[in-house]
Image (cartoon, helix red, strand yellow):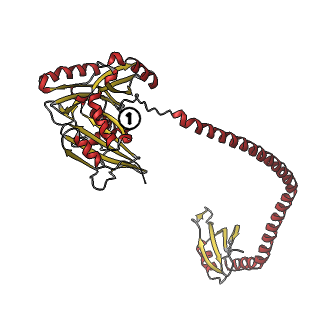
Amino acid sequence: MITKEFLGIYLEKDMLQYCGAVKAISAWSVFLSEAATAPSGVLQGAYPETLRKFLMELTPRQARRIFLALPRNRFFIRDMSLPPMPMEDALSSVQSALPMTCHLPLEDIFYDIFLCRIPDGGVNALVIYAPRKEIQPLLDIFRETGHEKSLSGLFPVSLGVGAWLSLQHYAMPMGLMLSSENSGRELAVYQNTGCIFSTAWRESDTGATDAAPRIALVQSRFHLHEEGIFCLVPAGETMLLPDPLRDGLGWLPSVRQNLGAAALCVPVSGQQSILLNGGPPRLTTFHLWKVFLPVVVGVAAVLAVWTISMQHRIQHEKEVVSALKKETVQLRQQVQPLEKTRDSLKKMESLFADIDDFVKLRPRLFTCFNEIARLIPEGTWFSRCVFQGTELSLQGQSRDTLKVIEALRTSGLFEQVKLVGSVNRLPTGIEQFNLSIRLKNVDATS
């Protein structure tokens, strides 16, 4: 959904450059609501009739905002440095000094004041003014074509270029050389917040060599290195401004070919808009506290209510937990005798199971022992017997261990008879050995 339409125009003696855009919910895009007119372009024609012709082709719209940029040589600019103070106080200070700042009577000029905060906390002010006789014909054109209420900015094009530099995140401070009509040149100095200085001259009058002292003065005053001054388009020995590292305005035409895009960058960047139309200087300030104070108060109230509610709930839960703990202690005291009885029953159950298993297995064991006694050679006896599942482990002595093993293997009661470990022969000739016997048809779980 389109919310606002913006139109940037750059006008000089024989050319008009323009670019339209809209700010939708998601992003900016180049756009002009007139279907018969391209959203951006360059028109040739004499000043100021080119502007009249262009505006007559546009249908006046209440939602449209027009920003008109003119060459620097149509304005006078005086810069002032102020100590740290609120912007409103800075504006009042500059206004009170206007009669001494401007070299023309105030009743003969249109003026506006561009303020920006500099890194040391101070305020830089540019007093921008022009003779009424130069600006009034342009205002008349807007009134006659029905676009008077749409005019939201009328300023030197260098302010729009500064907004473009800020949006492209160039390293600041920076000096930039700009070309103007009638062989004019401008050297402007920029901070992230906007233009802080501008000087202009005509090469045809002073000669190209007179630019060097101006550049040296700017370098000294603003502590700029030689590589900190660029030119927007190739000119002389000044270094050409490099392309931005990351083009954040790829949707716009290049300002090198269409300065209407530079005029459009002022509303896109949100910088202060300058309008020389006879009205008082406007200072757009955004007080965060006006927005956040009601929000903070509302959030604080909600948090207070929520905190009180949570405290009551926590206290209630603590009381419930305390009551449950008491009940738990009482139940444990009642359960302890039952647990002792249960443990005793489990022990008795295990004992009865062992007795039952032994009773079931006893006839089989007696048969095995009788079978072993029947088969082993004379002079053989056993000193230890262990029975686990189906395994019967025997430790014994005999004069001939192999005969004992061979004899036992002949029995049908034994599934496996094997010697465990080595056989120890005593000096008396008696052999000590360990046997493992697996019984047949005996459940291993018994």
The answer, for residue 40, to whether it is visible in the render is: yes
278 or 340: nearer the eye?
278
Indicate the quadrant where residue 126 lies.
Answer: top left
Note whether 429 is above or below 64 in the view shown.
below
| Residue 404 placement (x, y as % from top left) | 63, 75
Horizontally, residue 291 falls left or right of residue 26, namely right
The answer, for residue 253, to whether it is visible in the render is: no
| Residue 54 placement (x, y as % from top left) | 26, 46
Horizontally, residue 17 falls left or right of residue 267, namely left
| Residue 53 placement (x, y as % from top left) | 25, 45
Residue at x 34%, y 40% (from the top left corner): 143
162 or 22: nearer the eye?
22
Outermost residue toward the front in this view: 144
Residue at x 35%, y 43% (from the top left corner): 147
Task: Please identify the quadrant where the C terminus is shown.
Answer: bottom right
Residue to which mark 1 is pinned: 271
Residue type at tag 1: Gln
429 or 439: nearer the eye?
439
Task: Please identify the quadrant where the N terminus is shown.
Answer: bottom left
Assign a secondary structure to mark 1: loop
